[in-house]
Image: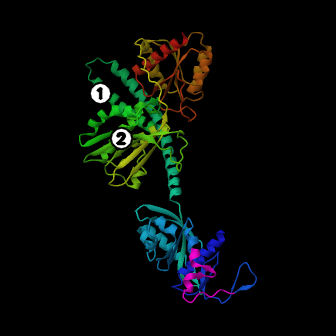
Amino acid sequence: MGTELVAKAKVTAAATLQTVAKGTPSPDVDGPLRIGPASPRLRSPRLSKPVRPRRPPQSVNRTTTSVGQVPMDRLRSIFDGMFDGVWLVGGDGRTTYANRAMAELLGVPRNGMRGRSIQDFLDAEEWLEVEAFLARQRVHAGERMEACFRRADGTNLFGLVAGSPILTDDGTFVGTMLNVSDVTGKRSMDAQIVQNQRLEAIGQFAGGIAHDFNNLLTSIQGYTEFARSSLPPDDPIRADLDQVLASADRAGSITKKLLAFTRRQVLLPSDVDPAVVIADLVPILRPLLGDAVNVVLDAPLRQVAVRVDPTQLEQIILNLAVNARDAMPSGGTLSIAIRSGPPPDPERPDPDLTAGPFVRISVTDDGQGMDEETRTRIFDPFFTTKGPGKGTGLGLSTVFGIVAQSSGQIQVETEPGRGSTFHVDLPRVRPAATADPPEEDSEMATRTGVVLLAEDDAAVREFARRSLELGGHTVIAAASGNQALEISSSARGRIDILVTDVVMPGLQGPELAEQVRIQRPDIAVVMMSGHAENGHGQGLELDPTVEFLAKPFTVDEINRLVGRALAEARIRSD
């Protein structure tokens, strides 16, 4: 069937071009279409006997009503039933025929195609390539290329174009038949795959840097804190050390944003009503964005829960709001809407997405909007359209990472001059009964005990040891997971709590904790890390009885967390 249609297509191409070269075309499926003089007797490909063609009525033009033995209206019906576009152009590049699919692909009325140059649907650079392609059709058959056509509404149509030259019997080139397949969707999917791979590569690189940098920051902050606490309150050097601590805090916030983008930060998800969280945030947004920006919350969806870290949900909204403010330098309206979201886009499957219903949070501004080139890069870390010193380029990349790590997805709708809308889809869960969080007993933070400390970085290990001893703990330090396990096995005295780094050479933190708990079932555990991965490149999933301490940390933070873990362990054992 496919071969017959190709043959018929070439025959039809010849018929529509007989204003250039009269005659009846004979189909040649594998080569160029040739137009020669009409033969008085044609031989059917299925019969051995000659077949005498019927003479058409005198009142009908033969060249437009039949080609060989197939009526023209029948061939046009076949073409109009095809999904691909059939486009015939003469030697001057002007349209002599286009089927219904071709006209629909270009968004042009059927009667508006004839006589138009193919150049009308191409930009200048693309036309040079297509012009060369058409020129090559004079001597080559069956060549293909991918071209970007401009639809009537200004959007792009990416087409896979196959060309066949139409020649007279003496070899004169009279035009080209083009078969155009719409590959816009496939191209978009390919671009999305490449984009995801590129972001993943950037993420792995940034995550590795952030992990090592957090160890350095832990040491910088820790030893600066020791030095500052050893000085008299009126010593002028304290002010210098305060600047060091403030700079370390800013550096730590950058690594947190990198870890958010790379999906390696540790989240503390819970079932929250996004309408409640965002409503509580609106009073903070208004002074942050300024009087020129009107904030509108449209949240009719109530008592619907999503599984997300509430602090990170606030971060998502804050970052999107600041981005919207910067897109509206003269002011405007920022709208935040909450609706039941659609399922993930089936044409762009994401293995990290959770199956099931979603809640869609849409943040819309009426600002400058973005062009396509900017839109494809907005989630890249350190990419910014702002001037030097006016932005880090980490705001939207942080949003991307938080949403992805929360098993959601983010999409952008934008046009230059028409503003932007960011759609954040988060997995919907059944609302759980809420209860007030237990108040932390003041005694929890002061509980002390024997600590087995496992940390491979010497500077961090020493800082953690001194910090815990300042808090009244007895510390047994180990430089690796294997050494810590040996100490646990051989120690005759009690060990109340294991404080371990997650990623270490040899035995990793989670495996160490598992084996130590076999030996000492009641031991409390605190995990330390600069990101949310275990030593095998997988997401860090903590047992509910395990506390997590994010690097960099302070003397107070490690002692408060260790004290709470000891208190909770003793409650469980009673």
Q: Which mark is residue 126?
A: none
Q: Nearer the viewer, residue 380 or 556?
A: 380
Tell me what residue is drawn at x 53 percent, y 39 percent.
356
Quadrant showing the C terminus? top right
Q: Which residue is mark 2?
A: 336
Query: Camera-side residue: 23 or 224?
Result: 23
Tell me if residue 155 comes above or below residue 223 in the rendering: below
Tag 1 residue: 240
Magenta span covers which residues? 52-75
Q: Is any atom of residue 192 visible in this view?
A: yes
Q: Position of residue 136 (x, y in %)?
A: 54, 75
Residue type, mark 1 in image: Asp
Left/right of residue 176 with respect to residue 553 in the rendered view? right
Quadrant location of the N terminus in the rendered image: bottom right
Q: What amino acid is at disc 2?
A: Ile
Callout 1: helix, strand or loop? helix
Q: Is residue 266 magenta?
A: no
Viewer-proximal residue among 257 and 305:
305
Sequence order check: which comes first, mark 1 or mark 2?
A: 1
Q: Can residue 262 be spotted in the picture?
A: no
Please say if 549 is above or below 413.
above
Vertically, is 48 above or below 521? Answer: below
Task: Give the CA separation, mark 1 to mark 2.
Answer: 43 Å
Position of residue 81 measured from the top left corner of the image (x, y, whole percent) = 57, 67
Q: Tell which residue pokes out farthest to the left in this image.
A: 291
Question: Residue at left 63%, top 82%?
Answer: 68
